[in-house]
Image: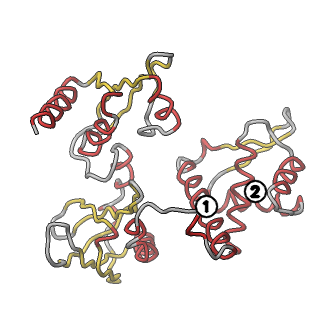
């Protein structure tokens, strides 16, 4: 639990500074105390250093404001680290609760058991990515009755809809493939290095897509209009990190995203049913119409 306490402390510090009111050392110390974390000012200073060295998030002092702010522009992975902090803190809180409460099943409900299947391979995969080792996996597709073996160069672990996926360069097929961790039956690190150029653009490629389908085209501007009620949800849970608000009033919430159109984008649009309208591109509008027509015919 020690690592959880440290990450929780980092998370509390960053959240306090993120408020934008330039808190002082004493303000941060008081914020931690209110969350049952008592530490010295010297420890906070050391935490600032560790947050910068370990996560690249720089905490800077502003003399005019007599307080601290986050220089998050220096780190393009800032949002990813915040997501990591949130997941770690939540995991730690759940663990503490489970230890202290014998009848927790009355008060908490998980989505599905399958959502955590395969996460036992994550440590090996992360090690292989960092050390540039090829891995051999026994993988069973939904359509197959038995698993097959393949060798891949792992490039990225990606979460989508509470499931984890490995994005990797398939050595034999010479192309990127997506593998659901819950469908990996066995995984071994080969000890043989791969050329990092094979996967160096992997993360950038998938920054332009919604979901886990391998991008096969160029990013396009997609304009969507939601009714005002649905817009409140889209505002707090953006469809994509490129989301820009074009209109937000009592009748309409309109956004623009820049993505490579794929199956998951279509799924996402259809999930909002009659509360969304595709404004552009025209071909996507017609595609959604065609899908709705087939649904009606069935």
Comparing 80 with 268, the one in front is 268
**Residue 159 appears left or right of 12:** left
Dots 2, 1 in contact, CB < 8 A: no
Residue named by callout 2: 48
Closer to the eye: label 2 or 1: 1
For label 2, the SS is helix
Q: How is the image coloured?
A: secondary structure
Seen at 38% across and 61% down, the residue is: 163
Determine crowd level at label 1: few under 14, some 14-19, many 20+ residues with C-alpha closer than 10 A: some
Residue at the left extreme of this rendering: 297
Seen at 62% across and 55% down, the residue is: 56
Seen at 41% across and 38% down, the residue is: 239
Q: Position of residue 114 (x, y in %)?
A: 37, 68
Q: Of the residues under marks 2 and 1, which one precedes in the sequence? A: 2
Instruction: Classify residue 152 by image quadrant.
Output: bottom left
Comparing 204 with 210, the one in front is 210
For label 1, the SS is helix
Instruction: Classify residue 165 by image quadrant.
Output: bottom left
Image quarter of the C terminus: top left
Q: CA distance from mark 2 to mark 1?
A: 22 Å
Q: Position of residue 178 (x, y in %)?
A: 27, 61
Q: Position of residue 256 (x, y in %)?
A: 39, 27
- How many numbered marks appear? 2
**Residue 158 appears left or right of 108:** left
Give residue 90's mark.
1
**Residue 262 appears left or right of 160:** left
Comparing 287 with 157, the one in front is 287
Q: Position of residue 199 (x, y in %)?
A: 33, 60
């Amino acid at each position: 639990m020690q690592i959880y306490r440290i990450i929780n402390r980092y998370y509390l510090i960053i959240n306090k500074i993120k408020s934008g009111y330039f808190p002082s050392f004493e303000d941060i110390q008081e914020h931690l105390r209110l969350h049952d974390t008592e530490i010295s000012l010297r420890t906070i200073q050391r935490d600032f250093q560790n947050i910068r060295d370990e996560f690249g998030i720089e905490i800077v002092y502003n003399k005019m404001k007599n307080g601290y702010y986050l220089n998050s522009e220096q780190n393009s992975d800032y949002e990813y680290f915040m997501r990591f902090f949130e997941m770690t803190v939540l995991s730690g809180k759940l663990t503490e609760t489970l230890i202290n409460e014998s009848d927790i099943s009355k008060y908490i409900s998980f989505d599905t058991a399958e959502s955590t299947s395969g996460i036992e391979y994550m440590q090996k995969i992360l090690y292989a990515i960092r050390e540039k080792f090829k891995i051999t996996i026994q993988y069973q597709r939904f359509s197959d009755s038995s698993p097959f073996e393949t060798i891949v160069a792992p490039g990225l672990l990606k979460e989508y809809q509470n499931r984890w996926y490995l994005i990797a360069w398939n050595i034999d097929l010479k192309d990127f493939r997506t593998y659901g961790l819950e469908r990996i039956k066995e995984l071994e690190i080969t000890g043989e290095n791969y050329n990092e150029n094979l996967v160096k653009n992997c993360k950038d490629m998938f920054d332009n897509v919604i979901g886990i389908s391998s991008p096969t085209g160029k990013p396009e501007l997609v304009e969507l209009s939601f009714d005002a009620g649905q817009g409140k949800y889209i505002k707090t849970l953006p469809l994509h990190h490129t989301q820009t608000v074009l209109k937000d009033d009592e009748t309409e919430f309109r956004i623009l995203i820049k993505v490579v159109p794929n199956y998951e984008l279509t799924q996402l649009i259809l999930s909002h049913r009659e509360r969304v309208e595709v404004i552009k591109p025209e071909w996507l509008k017609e595609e959604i119409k065609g899908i709705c027509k087939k649904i009606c015919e069935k």
